Amino acid sequence: MTQDLTSQQQGQHPIAPYLRMDRMPHIWCPTCGIGTVVKCFATALEESDVDLDKVAITSGIGCTGRVAGYMNLDAFHTTHGRAIPFATGLKLGRPELEVVVFSGDGDLSGIGGNHFIHAARRNMDLLVILVNNFIYGMTGGQNAPTTPPGARSSTMPFGNFERPFNLPHLAASCGASFVSRWTCLHIRRLTKSIRMALRGKGFRFIEVIAPCSTLYARLNRLGSGLNLMQFYHDNAQIRHNIDTREVSMDYQGNIVCGNFVNDENPTYLDMMHNHYEKTLGERYKPMPPEGGWIHE
Ligand code: SF4
């Protein structure tokens, strides 16, 4: 797809060329935070000047899982929790692509949690944008692995007593090369982190804290998504490069944001090529640009 830089001249919204406008209106509730994250992603694509023919996006199931269907990219809406393994196969088969996984906390850290830790462990070459609204949204507000202690969900109406994941620490301790967290109030900073991640390699993980106005906010009597945005304004702290053990979240406590990890660990594809060059020698033929395995 050719980037349409004349959209403003044509009276379109600047990110319209990045969206499938024929799919609008979207399904998200008023003051839901997912749309803001989509805007940041589209802006980062525009500012990164990437070839959109070389970007593919995958999502799983859930409210955030609808993102892939709205982006004007090669897109795959997969089954619940399976966006990362689908993306892994895509990246292995077509290594020239920038493969982006865009899904929710329930999908990626609950149903697909095993895939998440192994893709991070392998430092698989994927950009993973996880929208964390602390709950399963589309399926009815059930407790998620991210629900803060004490917060109410439809399956824990007297408050959550489980310990939630600290997702940046989970990703970092498994070996991710880039780890970042923002809220959807941090539009410029989030956009910049996505740009940085698009330039990077390996498993790049960005968690975005976003309001679920209809379920999480209502079940916890927190007001609308706008009230939660005010909460982010008052309680977010930016601490780049901090040890990710220190970024876990309490119910209505501080939200530590920033770029926590940015290193150059060997990626899965680097390690794979090095290994086959060593073990197969001249018999190993690297992947051709258009993809597809060739071995003699
Ligand atoms: S249910 Fe929650 S997460 Fe889903 S669209 Fe509505 S506000 Fe957003």
Image (cartoon, helix red, strand yellow):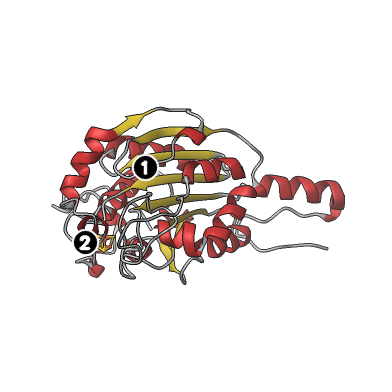
Query: Relative to 82, is 282 above or below?
Result: above
User: The C terminus is located in which quarter?
Assistant: bottom right
Residue at 74% x, 62% y: name it.
Answer: 294
In terms of image quadrants, where is residue 19? bottom left
Residue pointed to by mark 1: 250
Counting residues from the start of the chain, the first of labels 1 and 2 encountered is 2
Residue at 66% x, 40% y: name it.
Answer: 266
- Please state the horizontal and vertical placement of residue 170, each as a whole percent of the image: 54, 45
Q: Is mark 2 within 8 Å of ligand 1?
A: yes
Residue pointed to by mark 2: 214
In terms of image quadrants, where is residue 67? bottom left
Q: Residue furthest front?
A: 158
The answer to whether residue 177 of the structure is visible from this angle is: yes
Front residue of this view, candidates 139 and 190? 139
Residue type at numbered disc 1:
Asp
Residue type at numbered disc 2:
Thr
- Please state the horizontal and vertical placement of residue 84, each as a whole percent of the image: 53, 60
Circles 1 and 2: CB distance less than 8 Å?
no
Query: Relative to 296, is 267 above or below?
Result: above
